[in-house]
Amino acid sequence: MRVLVTGGCGFIGSHVARALVAAGHAVTNLDALTYASNPANVASIAAHPRYRFVEGNICDSALVRELVADVDVVINFAAETHVDRSLLDPGIFVRTDVEGVVSLLEAVRATRTARLVHMSTDEVFGSLAPGVEAEEEGQFAPTSPYSASKAAAELQVRAYAETYELPVTVLRSCNVYGPNQHIEKFIPLFITRALAGVPLPLYGDGLQEREWIHVDDIVAAVGLLLEHLPGAAGAHAIHIGSGERLPNRVVAEAICRLAGRDESLIQRVEDRPGHDRRYALNSRRLRSRGWRPAVRFEEGLERTVRWYAGNADAWAAAENPEFREYFARQYGERLGAV
Ligand code: TYD
């Protein structure tokens, strides 16, 4: 298949792009090279004959239309994804996550040959009560500018699927972790700081619950779904969840243990405003197609800690002046005040 992967220099996009090339597909990677992109993530396929890199933004309708005309499938991983940054600067989330998706939908509508697979998130459902799992047809209740932008994108997907009779696949994943994730996110931030022996800023009481899945399991799910893309018009939602739900404090303690640090490194800091307590996905639909998560959290976290410990070069570039400025804005008072 000829696949356009958007955001292919980012965390999940790069894992998928590499796997697709390895599986024999031809991949065009459209990436805007924002702060969250790292071309080194795709260095291993950069010279491959079935791989092409195009620097550009999914909001660039003319470019997107030209690229979409040449492929069978578009998988959209291009997004602003960090809740904390969406609280500091929501505008870019609307532009990339909503307008960018409309640009992709317009291109798919114009060509009518390429299928769209759109990556979304469990966060569109907002915070769930204990014991509750979000079903694919559950109601949206986003709470952060980030999750609101992803929910808005999904509404556009639904509108296009309905109005123009397009078959679109929407993937909603729980929290993903693994090698090459940007260090702003909880697990890599805590791992790299634990390795350096500096405080781990745990928001609020640390009892917020997240469902964690290793990026390899996402790659496997995407590979399986690509083989069975729906032919009927409509927005077909699929949840990719591991079922492994843990309070942040437990994850932070496990990271300390794996990094050989004392738990006293964990510092309780001022909570994120509007912090969702709990996410949980029902992923029966995907499991009924034969997919199972292969990486248990305990094993995946250990592998991930080992990866960050052994690949400082790969992520050190992210500790640039822009990140230091963000870190000071986000954590300066929080860490200073404790
Ligand atoms: P994050 O990786 O930002 O993902 P999301 O907010 O999209 O789930 O955060 C995961 C959890 O970890 C979330 O409950 C917020 C918490 N967290 C902290 O306690 N401290 C931090 O410094 C960060 C980045 C996150």
Image (tube, rainbow, N blue to C red):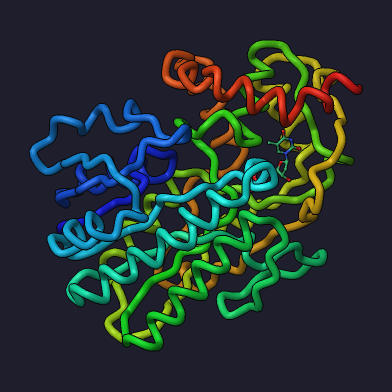
Residue found at the far left of this picture: 49
- Looking at the picture, how far across and down is residue 143, in whole percent? 72, 61
Residue found at the far top of this picture: 197
Instruction: Identify the image quadrant of the C terminus.
Output: top right
Left or right, 262 with respect to 179, comes to right
Query: What is the quadrant of residue 236 in the picture?
Result: bottom left
- Looking at the picture, how far across and down is residue 81, in whole percent? 55, 47
Left or right, 209 with respect to 180, comes to right
Residue in front for this viewpoint, 251 or 66: 66
Residue in front for this viewpoint, 300 or 1: 1
Q: Quadrant of ligand 1?
A: top right
Could you tell me which residue is drawn at 31 percent across and 81 percent down? 166
Could you tell me which residue is drawn at 46 percent across and 44 percent down? 215
Query: What is the quadrant of residue 165 in the picture?
Result: bottom left
Q: Is residue 181 above or below residue 242?
A: above
Q: Is residue 325 above or below residue 177?
A: above
Instruction: Identify the image quadrant of the N terminus.
Output: bottom left
Could you tell me which residue is drawn at 34 percent across and 70 percent down? 105
Left or right, 159 with respect to 230, comes to right
State the count of labels: 0
Residue in front for this viewpoint, 209 or 32: 32
- Looking at the picture, how far across and down is residue 123, in whole percent? 64, 60
Could you tell me which residue is drawn at 66 percent across and 68 percent down? 125
Q: Is residue 300 above or below residue 166?
A: above
- Looking at the picture, how far across and down is residue 185, in whole percent? 61, 36
